[in-house]
Image: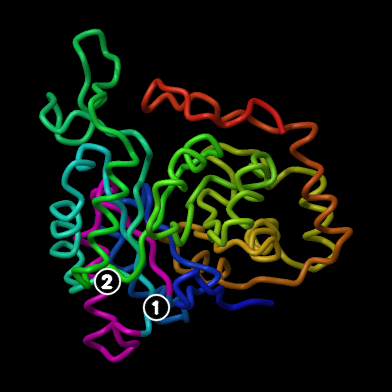
């Protein structure tokens, strides 16, 4: 099984990373330090998660105690939507919180610029409650500014997140630097094969977030998954994480529980019959991600595969 993948920059990225989205305040630093202690070398963070200070504390403790060195850990952060006109400012704030001189990968979190001067620094809204978007800016302009970040040394690579085929096809003709990665929600209910195939064709690594399904997902009880888990004598979580690595995707399970963090690092080789069983689940019970309520805009994801 692959322990790392190679980005189009030539850099190695560990196949399994620790996700930090929605991790409980006050526990993130300990989770990051523990993850590095048990062998993780890939930490995924973001400005909007509101916990990069704690991620930075966990990293610093691991570095200071000799668990690992900075150059041995792949760290990702993300540009938030209200900073699309000023990516370097967002990156600088993130680096300060993370207590780092650089990140290994910097992603555009969403291809949706929001009003940087709205009524909220992160989630501005109009009076009617709709999202206050920056309609005079575009994700393409944002990308051109992100390309300039590579010259600063503050990030080793740049990429995108939550990009559908529609947005990636808009972006690619304008790229001097092809995105190194596209981080998307991905699991058997939502394999997003169309964008995964396009990214593979263009040499863009897929990073899978929410690999165990969205909050409240019944994937752990899904018959096809429990059968594969029983066959390999592992838990359903291991199957779902291994599913991504077997597909050639980096995967970002999140947890603050020490035993779960350790379990999530273990992956198994799945054979063709296992993959067929997992790939078939969405045909019966797949979900839609065509309209994201957070933005109230269509992002171009198909209703069905």
Q: Is residue 52 magenta?
A: yes
Identify the image quadrant of residue 159: bottom left
Q: Residue at position x 45%, y 27% from top?
A: 292
Residue hosting label 2 = 58
Tell me the tag on residue 267: none
Q: Position of residue 6 (x, y in %)?
A: 53, 74
Quadrant placement of the N terminus: bottom right
Q: Residue at position x 52%, y 72% from top?
A: 262
Q: Residue at position x 49%, y 43% from top?
A: 168
Which residues are the magenta region?
Answer: 42-71
Which residue is at the far right? Answer: 273
Q: Residue at position x 62%, y 50% from top?
A: 196
Q: Position of residue 286 (x, y in %)?
A: 70, 33
Residue hosting label 1 = 36
Q: Give 183 or 204, whichever is nearer the viewer.
A: 204
Task: Please say if the residues under marks 2 and 1 sit with CB atoms less than 8 Å apart.
Answer: yes
Q: Give 152 or 227, whichever is nearer the viewer.
A: 152
Secondary structure mostly seen in the magenta stretch: helix
Q: Is residue 132 above or below residue 228?
A: above
Q: Position of residue 108 (x, y in %)?
A: 34, 48
Q: Is residue 305 above or below residue 293?
A: below
Q: Secondary structure at mark 2?
A: helix
Q: Give 259 or 12, whichever is nearer the viewer.
A: 12
Of the image marks 2 and 1, the number of the one nearer the N terminus:
1
Q: Is residue 207 left or right of residue 146?
A: right
């Amino acid at each position: 099984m692959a322990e790392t993948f190679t980005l189009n920059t030539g850099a190695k990225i560990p196949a399994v990373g620790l996700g930090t989205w929605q991790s409980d305040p006050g526990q993130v630093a300990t989770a990051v330090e523990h993850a590095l202690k048990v062998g993780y070398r890939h930490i995924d963070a973001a400005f909007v998660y509101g916990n990069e200070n704690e991620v930075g504390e966990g990293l610093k403790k691991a570095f200071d105690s000799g668990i690992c060195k900075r150059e041995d850990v792949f760290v990702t952060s993300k540009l938030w939507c209200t900073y699309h006109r000023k990516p370097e400012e967002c990156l600088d704030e993130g680096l300060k919180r993370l207590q780092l001189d650089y990140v290994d990968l910097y992603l555009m979190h969403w291809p949706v610029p929001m009003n940087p001067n709205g009524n909220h620094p992160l989630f501005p809204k109009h009076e009617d409650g709709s999202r206050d978007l920056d309609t005079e800016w575009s994700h393409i302009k944002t990308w051109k500014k992100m390309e300039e970040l590579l010259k600063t040394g503050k990030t080793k690579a740049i990429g995108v997140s939550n990009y559908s085929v529609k947005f990636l096809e808009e972006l690619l003709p304008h790229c001097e630097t092809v995105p190194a990665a596209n981080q998307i929600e991905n699991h058997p209910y939502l394999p997003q094969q169309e964008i995964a195939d396009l990214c593979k064709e263009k040499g863009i690594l897929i990073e899978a977030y929410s690999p165990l399904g969205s909050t409240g997902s019944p994937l752990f009880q899904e018959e096809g998954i429990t059968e594969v888990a029983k066959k390999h004598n592992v838990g359903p979580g291991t199957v779902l994480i291994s599913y991504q690595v077997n597909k050639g995707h980096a995967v970002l399970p999140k947890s603050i529980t020490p035993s779960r963090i350790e379990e999530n690092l273990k992956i198994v080789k799945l054979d063709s019959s296992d993959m067929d069983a997992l790939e078939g689940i969405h045909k019966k019970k797949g979900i839609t991600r065509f309209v994201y309520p957070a933005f109230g805009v269509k992002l171009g994801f198909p209703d069905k595969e």
